[in-house]
Structure formats: C-alpha cells, structure tokens
Image (cartoon, coloured by chain):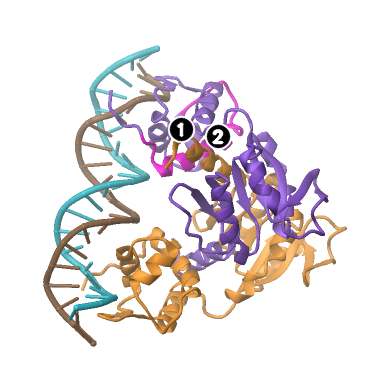
Chain colours: A orange, B purple, C cyan, D brown
Amino acid sequence: MPVMRAIPRATVARLAQYLQGLDQLEGRTISSQAIAAVVGVGAAQVRRDLSYLGHQGVRGVGYDSEHLRRAIMRELGLIGTVGVAIIGAGNLGQALAGYGGFGERGFEVFSLYDIDLAKVGEYVNGLPIRHIDDMAADARSGRFAIAIIATPAEAADEVLTQLNEAGIRSVLNFAPAVLRPPTAMEVRNVDLSTELQILSFYRKHGR
Amino acid sequence: MPVMRAIPRATVARLAQYLQGLDQLEGRTISSQAIAAVVGVGAAQVRRDLSYLGHQGVRGVGYDSEHLRRAIMRELGLIGTVGVAIIGAGNLGQALAGYGGFGERGFEVFSLYDIDLAKVGEYVNGLPIRHIDDMAADARSGRFAIAIIATPAEAADEVLTQLNEAGIRSVLNFAPAVLRPPTAMEVRNVDLSTELQILSFYRKHGR
DNA sequence: CTCTGTGAAACACTTCACAGCG
DNA sequence: CGCTGTGAAGTGTTTCACAGAG
C-alpha cells in the first residue's frame, strides 16, 4: 500500500470532466471503458485517475455511478454550495451572470461588483450589482469563496490584490492580462486571444 | 544539428503568453530573465521554448524584442488577419463580439450566427448576425478559419458536425458539453463549471 | 470470464548546470 | 564577462500489460 497522496494536476482537471460525463451515461454501473469513451481519453487513464480516490470500483463489474459521482464531488470539495462573485459588470460579467449552469453544479453567484456607480444597484438575471468597495467585506463575511475577474485588463491587477487581502484564494481570470498572483492564490486564466493563437498554431501545423 | 521538430504542446501555449508579455517590456533587447519574470515561469524554460524557434537570441546580450515578436507570430501562424466566427448570438456570443482585443491580436470576427430568425439581420458591436444556415457557405468561401461555439450545450454537437463538414478545423468551445471531435479537428474547451470545480479542489487541498 | 487496480515502462516536460559565443 | 542554447538529470504523466477480485 503506497503512500501516494497528492493527486496530479492533470487528474484533477479530468475528474471534473468525468463528473460531467457521468450525466450522459445511463445505467447503475459504469465501466472505465464507458467513461473513457464519453470524455475521449484512454480507459487506463480513467482507472488510474479514479484509483486516486481509493478503491471505488468492483472488479469484473465496474463503478456504481451514484457512488462514483459522490466520491468525485467530495474530492473536488463540492459539498454544499460554493459562493462565487463576478468582478466587473460589463459585457462579459453580465453574460457570465446569465449562465445557467452554476446552480446545477453546486455554485451560487452571490453578486456582481463594479466601480461604475451608474450600474450599482441594478440587477442582472436576478443578481445585484454592488460597488467594488463592498467586495472585501462580502468576501470576509464568507458570502463567496471564489471570484471571477471580468474587468478590463488594466483593473485586473488591483482587483487581484484586493481579493488576496480579503482572503480569497481562488480566482478565475477572464481579463487579458498576465497576472503574477501571490503563491497562496490559485489563479486560472481564460484568455481568448491566447486560445485563438494556440488554435492558429495547430491550424498551420496540424496536431 | 538535431532533428527535434515538433514543438511541445506546453510550449505552444507559453509562446502565446510570451507574445503578450513582450507588450509589457521596454527596451530593444530582452533577456530570458526579463520575459520569465513577467510571465511567471523559469528563465531556463523561456530559453528552451524559444530555442524551438531556432537561434533567435544573441549570447551575452539577449533577444531583440521586435525580431522575437515576429518570430513567435510567424510560428503561431499569425501572418495577416485570421477570420473568426461566433456561433450563437445569445448572452455569451454577444459579449464575445464586444471583446475589443481581437483586432490588436490579428483576429477579425467576420460574423455571428444564430438559429433565431428574430435576431438574424441585427448587428452587435458592428457585426452582423447571420442565419446558421449561411455558416457553411461562409466557411467554405474562406470568410473565417476559426469558429467559437457559444451556443447552448444541446446545439454544440450539431454545430461541430456542420463546422467539420464545412472544412473548419479549429474550434473554441464555450458550450458546457463534452464534445468528441473528429481527429482532424482541434477543439479547445472553455468550460466555466469545470474551471470552478478545479478551483474548488485547490481551495480545499492547497497547491 | 470481465473489469479493476497498479507495477513497470514509456513518454513528455521541466530544471539544472555549464560549455561556448559575442 | 553575460546570457544563450542545450546535454543530461529530474520530475510528472500516460500507457502497457497483467495479476487478482468478484
């Protein structure tokens, strides 16, 4: 029995996919084969990944889908509801606020924040736009644990600093800026231009 | 002279970052050190990545920033303007259409496409919304080379098939669906729930 | 006999450390 | 002397292939 604790980063990313893939699968028990087919990875990969959660399967049979779903959710820290804030109520922030998939997946958007007083007080998709100066207090009182930065690039750095000081450690950044987060923070970047440039490369060179 | 041709996938992703990072750096010559500092990776990593482009630097001095920028852009296939289409003119599609960073980075959104006749004919940020049935013809006549899927999850699969048949090989998918693209296609997924779930894991476990 | 769980091998990527060029 | 380019070592991830449980 090895000591292997830390789950590889690559595995964490796939666990979230498996969770999504389980929704598309029928039946009480599921094989690594079936999961692999639906998310497009190898079956051995699936088994290896799931083995980090402990022995979840039954040899000769497969995995119990409900049991497995719960095991993955537990590992991803998806117990109860996780509060999310959207910083920046521009085009993108408002579009993200309109995204319906949060609730189903255990996330709840608490509020949007903006610096523009003309927007503050309005509602988007039932969610209030609050002033950016209220953000830190809301974070500290536990209203949200994850922040999504949807501001212009120039503001992203300042927002990141404020979030850090307010104790938020998990950030999804949509602003096209290269951030240098403090080591305590986990920042994931979604940069449209970067993605398109990567696609451009593979268009030119093939796989 | 080694045969090493294929650029690692991880390197391709960073080249796009370096390009972005160069904008934040002053001066005619730049060291691997400086680039590393601004994008947050190791200097050795930067030098290794750039070495895939051939000998671009000068020993004892560094890299010529303009020369380097061009070398990276060439490698990423960013010569001239690359046409982009946005499929789905809902919240997200319209928000993406409003994103200003395309032009600066050599991309040009040609049009949005939607199935809703009420939207067809309108303009978003100066861009026309065309009917989804026009998409294939526009693709085939070379109006765009990359597509962004911003439809509901249910429609994503069908859209992907149509794009493939129209000869589009590069797709950025924002729909929360697990797609199984044909091998000829390169699909990059941006899934909000998946990202939040990954952040949730690291919030619970630390790095 | 089927399908999991996992050593071991293969592969991919990163980091070290230094030779060598300007 | 300073900084690049790169063998070689180290680390992380994937795949193979099979023992073993049900």
The chain letter under disc 1 is B
Question: In the picture, residue C19 is in which quadrant?
Answer: top left
Quarter the N terminus of chain B occupies: top left
Query: Residue under circle 2?
Result: B19
Q: Which mark is residue B92?
A: none
Q: Position of residue B146 (x, y in %)?
A: 59, 43
Residue B126, magenta (yes or no) = no
What residue sits 58% from the left and 37% below the top?
A: B20
Work out whether mark 2 precedes mark 1 in sequence or the reverse, and give the earlier one: 2
- Front residue of A140/B111: it is B111
Q: In the picture provided, is C6 more to the left or to the right than B123?
A: left
Quarter the C terminus of chain B occupies: bottom left
Q: Which amino acid type corresponds to the residue marked 2 in the rendered image?
A: Leu
The chain letter under disc 2 is B
Residue B29, magenta (yes or no) = yes
Residue A156 position (above or below residue A21): above
Dots 2, 1 in contact, CB < 8 A:
no
Q: In the picture provided, is B201 more to the left or to the right than B28?
A: left
Residue B95 seen: no
Query: Residue under circle 1?
Result: B33
Q: Which amino acid type corresponds to the residue marked 1 in the rendered image?
A: Gln
Residue B171 position (above or below residue B196): above
Residue A76 seen: yes
Q: Position of residue A8 (x, y in %)?
A: 36, 61
Task: Tell me the magenta residue range.
Answer: B6-31
